[in-house]
Amino acid sequence: MKKISYLVIVLLSLIACEGDRGPQGLDGGVLLGNVYEINRDLLPQNNYSTVFEFPLDIEVFESDVVLVYLLEEVINDEGAGPASVWTPLPQSFFFDDGNQVVYTYNHTYFDAKIFLDGNVNLDTVPDEYVFNKTFRIAIIPAEYAENNPNLNSYESVMQSMPDGKIIKID
């Protein structure tokens, strides 16, 4: 009988234990994702590309979704101030002569490579397509991505992360 009483006491104490609650997952309505902002030049010596290595303090799984957005322009809304226009990659830009350049990317679980491609000699592309480009890289948990049909909308992704912060990387 003493053994049963001891077992009941141990079980009740384990059930009653309290401590800091861990991070909430999808069931709690909070998305654990990360968004990083980088500003880079896509230089010829790097094959018109840049590589962003994910910080070591986050864990990215092979199954997670990595999305990249290009800051296409900033418009001035007279009532609300400046508004950034974020475009999901890949994104094509067409020239008057019919040629095009494409911003695109690929990724692993440890980095994202963003690069310029197209049917034109990239050495002849105007500087505005190569220098001072701002990108946001969103790392989305796979479970969330499966249930969210609107991952191409930057606004939708950001609204799903109410406590999400943009981490600017120099």
Image (cartoon, helix red, strand yellow):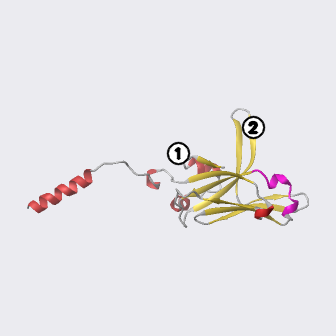
**Depicted 163 relative to depicted 112: above or below:** above
Q: In x, y percent, where is residue 20?
A: 36, 48
Q: Residue furthest left?
A: 1
Q: In x, y percent, where is residue 148?
A: 56, 57
Q: Residue furthest right?
A: 97
Q: Which label's residue is closer to the chain start, 2 or 1?
A: 2
Q: Residues within 10 Å of mark 2 (few under 14, many from 20)?
A: few
Q: Secondary structure at mark 1?
A: loop
Q: Which amino acid, by three-letter code, is at mark 1?
A: Asp
Please check the rendered image and state whether residue 131 is part of the magenta-colored stretch, yes or no.
Answer: yes
Q: In x, y percent, where is residue 72?
A: 75, 50
- Pointer 1: what residue? 163
User: Which numbered circle lies on residue 76?
Assistant: 2
Apparent side of residue 114 relative to residue 164 in the rendered image (left or right): right
**Depicted 165 relative to depicted 55: above or below:** above
Q: Secondary structure at mark 2?
A: strand
Do the numbered discs 2 and 1 sit on residues whose CB atoms are within 8 Å?
A: no
User: Which numbered circle lies on residue 10?
Assistant: none
Q: Residue at x 62, y 62 (%)?
A: 111
Q: Residue furthest top?
A: 79
Kindly report the distance in space between the C-alpha atoms of the residues bearing marks 2 and 1: 26 Å
Q: Which amino acid, by three-letter code, is at mark 2?
A: Asn
On the image, which quarter does residue 112 sit in?
bottom right
Q: In x, y percent, where is residue 167?
A: 60, 48
Apparent side of residue 145 relative to residue 25 in the rendered image (left or right): right
Q: Which quarter of the image is occupied by the N terminus?
A: bottom left
Please check the rendered image and state whether residue 121 is part of the magenta-colored stretch, yes or no.
Answer: no
Observer-nearest of 132 and 79: 132
Q: Residue at x 81, y 55 (%)?
A: 129
Observer-nearest of 61 and 40: 40
Q: Which residues are magenta?
A: 122-132
